Amino acid sequence: MNSPDFMPIAQSATADADVGRASRFLTVSLARELGILLSLSLLFPFMIHIIPVPEDAQLGPKLLPMFYAPLLAVLWGRLQSALGVALLAPWLNWVLTSHPSPPSAVVMMIQLLGFVVVLRLLLNRVGARWFLAAPAYLSGIVASLAVAIVFPALIHGRGALVWALQSVTVGLPGIAILVLINWLVLRFYPPSAGGGGPQAA
């Protein structure tokens, strides 16, 4: 029979363990990284949208600015920060700018999560390569396509396959930019051996 005198101690130990796990997940460093990456996820689309072009130019879908910050985070070994940006950035943009719309924010979140997860898997499987951003982006499209087939309202009832093909076609300049960023990071700012961001010059 357990003594009641030991019950508070056991509960306290469990609570301390839970706090320890939470503190390991959300450290000051991680919070700072996440704040910087979320700021970049707001800044990149804003800079794209202030370019003086016709309203129907669709620079966002063409240049894919929402993918730049998660790409940097994954390449530098910051998976937790990249996942946080993928989950939060579409909604933060919606709250602050009313874009994208909530259904589009769901689609964008799924694309970013697929992009981050597959990019990390590719890095683990084949190592750092200059072209990995392209298959990772296409994987994000495939993930959002699967969800759009089940929930067509997210893409306003359009044909899911046609929508996915159009997204890839329109986004070809953005895919090229992602590959360019991928190459530039690995060429000039490669991750350190411990995955702690870019190597010191």
Image: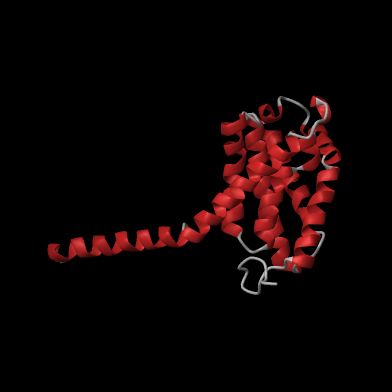
Report whether 107 appears left or right of 163. Answer: left
Measuring from the top left, give residue 76's x and y in whole percent: 66, 63
Residue 138 seen in render: yes
Pick whichever, 201 or 171, lies toward us.
201
Measuring from the top left, give residue 61's x and y in whole percent: 77, 37
Report whether 5 appears left or right of 48. Answer: left
Measuring from the top left, give residue 138's x and y in whole percent: 78, 48
Pick whichever, 105 or 36, lies toward us.
36
Residue occupying image coordinates x 67% and y 67%:
198
Quadrant showing the C terminus: bottom right
Residue occupying image coordinates x 70% and y 43%:
44
Measuring from the top left, give residue 69's x and y in whole percent: 67, 51
Callout count: 0
Q: Is residue 115 above or below residue 164?
A: below
Which residue is at the far bottom? 193
The answer to which quarter of the image holds residue 144 is: top right
Q: Is residue 48 above or below residue 80?
A: above
Q: Is residue 92 above or below residue 70?
A: above
Quadrant showing the N terminus: bottom left
Residue 134 seen in render: no
Pick whichever, 14 or 47, lies toward us.
47
What colour scheme does the image use?
secondary structure
Residue occupying image coordinates x 74% and y 34%:
49
Residue occupying image coordinates x 60% and y 42%:
89
